[in-house]
Image (spheres, rainbow, N blue to C red):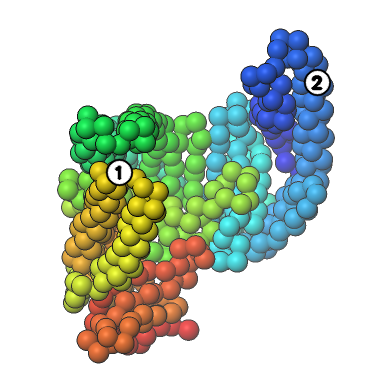
Amino acid sequence: MKRFDKGYIYSSLLTDLFYSFVAVFVFLQDFFLNEDSNPDDVAAAIPVFVIGYVVVYLCFVAYRILYYRVSGYELTEKEIKCNRGVLFRKRSVLDYKKVHAINKKQNLIHRIFGLAVLTVDSGSANTSHQAEITIIEKEKVVDALLSELNSLKENGVRSDAGETKTEEVLLSDKDSLYRFTSGKKMLYTLINIATTVFFTALFAVLAIIVLGVCKGLLQLDSLGTWGEYFLGAILITVAVMLLLSIFSFIGSIIHSFVGYYNFTITKHDHNIQISYGILEKHTNTFRYDRIKAVKISQGLVQRMLGFVSIRLEVIGYTVNSGDDDKNADLGVLVPFCKYDEIGEILERVLPDYIPDEKQTRSVAFFPFVSWFLLIFGVISGITLMGTVAVMAVLNAPSAAISAVAISIFGVALVVIVFRFISAVFRYHTNGLAVRDGKITAYSGGFTKCVTVFQAKNLIAVENVTTPLRKKQGIASLVMHLKTNAHSNEVKVHIQRDTLSDELENMLTF
């Protein structure tokens, strides 16, 4: 069995320099950040810090060396094998014919040492939180393995000479089906910023109204010290929202221009390959027939401007980072495009997943808000009466009681209006289309979601209703797909009760 490349040790130890520092600093932070600490205490703590740093780093060194010595991989005639782990050793064996997704990743440290991480998934729902096979090798070796495994999963047998019996699968940038250009990235960034600004402005308007009320009450000396505290809390909240907007602006630029650097989609035979990233480069390859669903999402600002994002639901599409607990059940297919371009893009990449127009729609509006109005109304009423009663017992000024009552009522009114608008969006969005073994589900409120999947991936249908809705012949539908446990449901609300019978007839076993 071949061991991983030695560069794994060096690249890991380079990052462990930082992790060791953080671990020791967190443990000894009271010596350095405590207000009662004097220069003598800090000076006395430095040797302890150095010794602790060396000890922790040596532990990392020992772990990396042991991991390297016990980890490795092997390609046999019909399967790929992999050993890894120190305290908890893992031995994985995967038949070539069961290979589902092959993903390559390089972060900045890996690229310095010429390394890459290759993960191979079977697509099993039981192991969707991790990759069965993880290989750390030189980039050229990983590229060769990726190409060879793409061929082996078609043929399933490896020759004695180490060459496959099928034609090599080549995925070239010349065959790119979609490119995330600089112009699209700029629009993507601007729309993300516009979304943040929109909600920040909405919050700011509410804050200005509250501040105006507080200012008037303070001038009347009705709220006293508590009013000043309340005013200060509002100002701090507004400042935090503005700060978050700035971070969102910076994050959007980094995410679009760095995270999606050189984003391309290529397709050859039954394989689709998605490549992107500059600091952390990803190359994800999976079979066309293992895609379970396509999800098209639109935020509120995106809906107003006519743009969407398209994602894939693929079992085994894990984050190939060496951290087995991370999972990316939704793979990005198209980060950003116009709504009118969906059909054109999917026609080239995934022709079986082009969404159909809604054939049904929600048949009643009130159920979207009924339970919320009942529960929230009771909670708000109890909160209002309880607060007023407590303040009255404490002999609070009548002006203060009135201000608190108005504030609670105002917050409740804002929440109800917000919920009502969301219900209006959900009422107009929810619907289904069933055609030629393909199901298109429309759902969502402020964020519109269109999920397209094949009937062969439908494993269960739930009919959720109440006695009153049953009499009216309406229900909410929950459809379960053959996907990861965290995202295997598609919900469509307040539809005709007979739809569940139609969907049940499409179930395959």
Residue, x 18% and y 77% (percent of image)? Answer: 363
Nearest the eye: 83 or 459: 459
State whether residue 484 appears in this view.
yes
Nearest the eye: 75 or 18: 18
Nearest the eye: 489 or 113: 489
- Residue underneath mark 1: 397
- Above or below: residue 369 compared with residue 50: below
Please state if 55 lies on the left or on the right of 199 as rendered: right
On the image, the x and y values in percent for residue 63 come to: 79, 38
On the image, the x and y values in percent for residue 324 come to: 63, 51
State whether residue 348 appears in this view.
no
- Residue underneath mark 2: 48
Q: What's under tag 1, amino acid-wise?
A: Pro
Mark number, residue 361: none
Residue, x 55% and y 34% (percent of image)? Answer: 107
Disc 1 crowd, CA 10 A, few/some/many (<14, 14-19, 20+): few
Q: In the rendered structure, which disc, 1 or 2, sits on the residue that comes first in sequence?
A: 2
Q: Secondary structure at mark 1?
A: loop
On the image, the x and y values in percent for residue 194 come to: 24, 37
Disc 2 crowd, CA 10 A, few/some/many (<14, 14-19, 20+): few
Task: For marks 1 and 2, give the CA distance.
Answer: 58 Å
Image mark count:
2
Nearest the eye: 11 or 240: 240
- Above or below: residue 106 compared with residue 410: above
Residue, x 41% and y 76% (percent of image)? Answer: 458
Quick one: which residue is furthest to the bottom in this view? 471
